[in-house]
Amino acid sequence: MPNFLRNFTYLAAVDLSNNQFYGEIHNSLQGLSNLIFLLLMSNNFSGSISPLYNLSSLEGLEISSNHFTGTLAQDMDVAFPKATFLSFSLNYFTGAIPSSISNISGLSVFQIDENDLTGRVPGNLGKLKQLSFLELSRNHLGSSEESNDLSFLDSLTNCTKLKWLDIGGNRFGGQLPNSVANFTLHLQTLSMWGNYITGSIPEGIGELSGLSYLSLSFNVLSGVIPNSIGKLGNLSQLSLKRNKLHGEIPSSIGNLTQLSLLNMRENSLTGNIPSTLGNCTGMEEIGISGNHFIGNLPHDLFTQFQNLRYCDISHNSLDGLIPLVFGNLGVLNTLDVSYNNFSGQIPTELGEAVQLEHLRMAGNSFEGSIPASLGRLKSLVYLDLANNNLSGLIPKDLASIARLQNLNLSFNKLEGEVPFFKDASAVSVVGNSALCGGNPELHLQPCEHFYLRKKGAILSRKGVIAICLSVFTSFSLLVIICIFCRSNKKKKKGDVDSLSERYKRVTYTELFKATDGFAESNLIGAGSFGDVYRAVILHQNERKPVAVKVLKLSKHGATKSFTAECKVLKRIRHRNLLSVITSCSSLDNKGNDFKALVFEFMSNGTLDNWLHSVDRRQDIRVLTLAKRLEIAIDVGCALDYLHNGCETPIVHCDLKPSNVLLDEDMVAHVGDFGLAKLLLGDFSGGESMSTALRGSIGYIAPEYGMGAAVSPLGDIYSYGILLLELITGRRPTDDIFNDEMSLQSFCERGVPDHVEEIVDQSLVGELHEVELKRRNPEETKLQYRAFLNSFAEVGISCAAEFPRDRMDIQSALMRLKRIKEKYDSMLASEKA
């Protein structure tokens, strides 16, 4: 902040926004008694804003997108008595919102979103008669439990000029009060997403006729969608995603003729999609996936949606044919009808939707051939037709779509030669046994060999049958028994075989030599179902260090674990998941069954070793706060992919530091899918493992101990424990934890005032080192503590006892990335 500004005593406005100013304000503005507007947004200013409290003439103060810290003054009305506009967004303010705000009688706009505020919102804000814009989102306000968290809303009904109210992304709990129906008719935006709000949507919500935006997503709302929703004639965006709503979509929704976005994903809604929805002719985005809708799609419904860009109706029980009209929607970008009960042929008309980038139709009963017209979709990035009954050839034109990044045609009845796709890693054709050719990296048979072998196999089988019938008739019963046994054995091998369609198999002898006879000197890890050895094998004409996981087949459940891991590994591909190179299922040198998986070798070992090894303090590569955040984000990205990015969601069921491996660049990779489970159908084969506890002691979600079904929220719990272990350096099973205190309660006691007492001592040492390099050590300490508190709060929220109280993985990732960005920015500002 330039000090010469204080010399211009008659200055009325100062605008330094959108620059690279840094440092504290100090007394740079002292004496500017005539200053009316001060704009400092989008800089790198830091420290306290207490010097601004002397500028009592200010009417507008905009300091958003900086690095200011500390709490707000308790006497805000004395500091800014004339203020009409206060914007403190995107900083690091902590503490509660002072109730004195309500005494600034002329205040029209108050923005303090994306900070670290806690506590309750003052219940006297209704005194602000001029208030038109209140933005409190993305803080830590509320308790997540108390029934009166939202009592301040009663007071806001007195703010008759209120147009914008956003309290999303906080911790407000309790029931949504009926008083929301009493808000002013001028209210245009009502956003309460990402809290812990319970109860039902009040029938009186329909009285807010001025609303154009309503978001109640990511809460715990139950009950039905009130019929009065149809009275919101000005509504353009309605988002009710991820609640517990049930019943049908009311037909009155057709009255919302201004509606452009409808998001009702992941509820328990039932019935048919109302045909009245076709009245919403301006519709641009529809998301109703993850419900229980039934029946046919009304064919004339989508005829009205000429502006439709996004349509996700996946994971329901819809049936019948896909409307041909989708091909006439000229701006359609995304169409997801996967995992329903649709049948018939894929309409050739879809090839006319030239703006399509994402087309997902997996998990239905589509039959016939893949329309050649899809090859005309030159904007296509993602095409998923897996798990249908499609037959015939793969259209050659699909290989000429330059933007195509993911093509999944798995588990159909396709046949013939596969077109040559330059990037084989983007293509999956497993589960189509009659395919051949294509890119060698797909590991399919060359077509000429494939057809010759097929013909020879038929002739050979006829000859064998003739001989058997003429010479060995007396042994027919034995032959039948043998065939039966071989058939069963093939079924058990099927999962390994399908994995080998992607990877060239390796023999027992090769692995025996590569590990020096599975020597103890090469043993790098041991688990419940197998030992892991370091080896070097020849892979793609190069010698490559690998990790070989050898199953302990004598251990109960080991074979099932191997099958489960193969099932999952053939479905996944992500930078933060441990990559399988090949597999082995054969006999060892003693004639015993032998099964092994070969993975990429992670040169930096497991996260568990880094956190708990007695020698880790001697290693020059300590886990800094930045690195711990990176690892947390890496693991979170892997979970997000498993839960939300796979065609069938996958639950890991055994997330812990020893199953997180670090490569040479310290990028984290999640491994060990031996207990993993697909959500839509158990893939393990044979006896279900659902009756046993899934996971490791200390990391298992408490509801699993009560017999609850496996769900992504179980992984979220384990992830929360892992985050707390990253911060504290303590295992959840350490001796200090017992019935009286858990790792979670240990962390809760430290946040926010005593966080340095609970974190790993190496982080405390890092804090002291950073302080020595900073111009303002006290400010640095406050900022560093704020980062630790925010990090811990994400872990605590994810590891909540009750599933409904846990933060979802995408929200957790968003917060962790924001913490990392702010921490990096703090370090960069010092270097600058």
Image (spheres, rainbow, N blue to C red):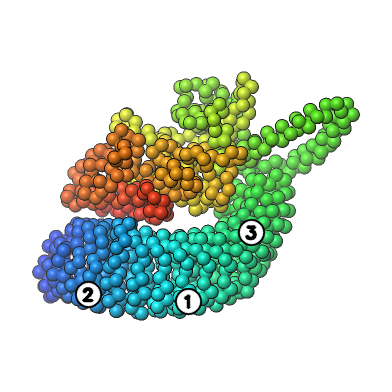
Is disc 3 in contact with disc 2, using a CB cutoff of under 8 Å? no
- First in residue order: circle 3 vs circle 2: 2
- Write down the residue under mark 2: 127
Q: Quadrant of the N terminus?
A: bottom left
Camera-side residue: 110 or 205? 205
Neighbor class of circle 1 (other Cα within 10 Å; few <14, some 14-19, many 20+) is: some
Q: Position of residue 562 (x, y in %)?
A: 56, 35
Camera-side residue: 832 or 88? 88
Residue at (70, 61) in percent of width and height: 344
Spatial CA span between label 3 and label 2: 55 Å
Which element carries disc 1, helix, strand or loop? Answer: helix
Report whether 331 appears left or right of 155: right
Q: Residue furthest top?
A: 590
Q: Amino acid at mark 1?
A: Gly
Which element carries disc 3, helix, strand or loop? Answer: strand
Report whether 78 appears left or right of 181: left
Find residue 230 and name its label: 1
Find residue 341 and name its label: 3
